[in-house]
Amino acid sequence: MNFELASRLTSSLNTDFQAFLPELVLCVSIVLMLLLRLIPRFDKLHMGWVALTFSIGICVLSCMQWKVNVFPDGPPMNNPSQTVTTFGGMLVFDNFTIFIKIFLYAFLTLVIVLTLMTGIPDKEDSADFYCLLFGSTLGMVIMASSNHLLMVFIGIEMASLPSYALAGFLKGRRQSSEAALKYVVYGGGASGVMLYGISFIAGHKDIGTGLLPEVVNQVGHHLGDPLILMGLLFILVGIGFKLATVPFHFWCPDVFEGASAEVGAFLSVASKGAALALLTRIIMGLGGLSEFGNAAHWGPVADYFVPVLSILAVATTTFGNLAAYGQTNLKRLLAYSTIAHAGFMVMALATMTRDGASAMLFYLGVYLFMNLGAFAVVAFMRNLTGQEDLSYYRGFVYRSPVLVIMLAIFLLSLLGIPPLGGFAAKFQVFAVLFDSGKMYEAHNKPGLAWTMYAVLVAGGINTVISLFYYVKVLKVMCLEKTLEEVEDRPIEEKPAPIAARLFTAAIAGAVLGLGLFWTPLYDASSADQALKSFRPVPAAEPKAAPVANAKEGAR
């Protein structure tokens, strides 16, 4: 009997480690970078190259998991197309998890390349910087793959704590230290509120567990309970903090302005991706498991959550766009732009359908390139001028035309101008809002249908509003006189380094390519691939029989 139990545990560990292999390599790389600087021969080595090597390898491992899991030639984990729980049911391994892992690791690799070209961090601080970067990414992966409320909290904390240090990494800069302090205060408060909400949910007499499949099933049957609603609200506070949705956005502009542009790029994309993945897993578990035209089993779930998510999305997008208009600091402007785009992605999730989740994933894939590109241009221009305020970039097109052209591509893509990738992303969101409105009409839910149409109109209006501040940046750089001309001095041309031009051109090429060729990313993010096995999963413990019933009920 003992041998049988040991055999089962060993077999389970093999499966767990196989699913968790990229994260294990990530942990090894963190330890290795810390140990290498203790060796005299390697203490002067810039750890960016070590970090880049490991990040490429980790990304390749995740891509191999995607290929095997989505297009299986054989059963690597006995059931390749199904959801697999790992580590006693605390984490879940499915197509959605792999998609987010590839997204995060690919973005991590691009950020490391950017930091190597901009010189932040220097050799002395490189080990600390990249360990923090890797540690935060590990927390975000855990957020995206959490199958238990405890792991949700641990993942958010693992992602947040290194981010606090990264925000204040610029030594000797008062604004950076102030940004880190604000980030810590807001983050600590959000974490406390979220933990309080988890205690409400897990300690409820009708739930009594932290496993997400059981929690979302029971929540769907007890939505009228004020303790359940309060617990959900408090949990959404923690997710909203990472996502920087209104009214949990206060930290975002100050942190982005005080931190380096490289850190701002990382927080603006990776943090949003992990938070959206976690929010998607909760929403889809609550009731968004059906295709269009099959909403009979939803019950009151959609009646509660569609209006809440819709209001949250519209308020976030509108506030982000309106606040961005008056900004003169480029990083602060992009921070409010980030808030607005988080609202657009929540709009897709507000439909509570698998097609809505697919549209969000497509948007997230495009957002990676266009937002990273915008922050990269800001970082390169900062290296040329030492400034980040828009007033210092008057007539900048005459000094570095390539950078201004690349920035124009990224900003117009964020705006949603065809044929760039941003247009394809917004088109996906608007299309799914319209289709979900039709679906709710067909199922005799006129209130939810008009909610979807209202969100669609709000999204279109906000796209027009964003035109003004994106074009304002290009106007200052292209049409206004240079500072040298205003001050009656000769124009000093400072072309960007070749590496900077190549990097931004490659990112701009990806933005244009995603606008012209939707199919690969669209197929990968579709319900047939990324969301193929996305459903409440059974608990790993064999004695937890109610989980299977919960799973069938959710179907």
Image (tube, grey):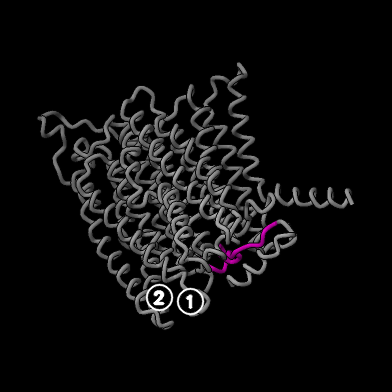
Q: Is residue 410 visible?
A: no
- Does the segment drawn in magenta span residue 492? no
Q: Which residue is mark 1?
A: 292
- Does the segment drawn in magenta span residue 528? yes
* 493 or 305: nearer the viewer: 305
Q: Amino acid at mark 2?
A: Asp
Q: Residue at x 39, y 66 (%)?
A: 429
Secondary structure of residue under mark 1: loop
Relative placement, left or right, of 422 versus 102 is: left
Q: Position of residue 304 (x, y in %)?
A: 42, 67
Whether pointer 2 and pointer 1 mark residues with C-beta atoms closer than 8 Å, the reply is yes
Q: Position of residue 221 (x, y in %)?
A: 53, 68
Relative placement, left or right, of 26 versus 414 is: right
Q: Where does the magenta region start and end?
A: 526-540
Relative placement, left or right, of 398 versus 277 is: left
Task: Give the class, few, some or many, for how many residues have Cα within 10 Å of label 1's Cα (few <14, many ≥20).
Answer: some
Q: Magenta residues: mostly which secondary structure?
A: loop
Q: Which residue is mark 2?
A: 435
Secondary structure of residue under mark 2: helix
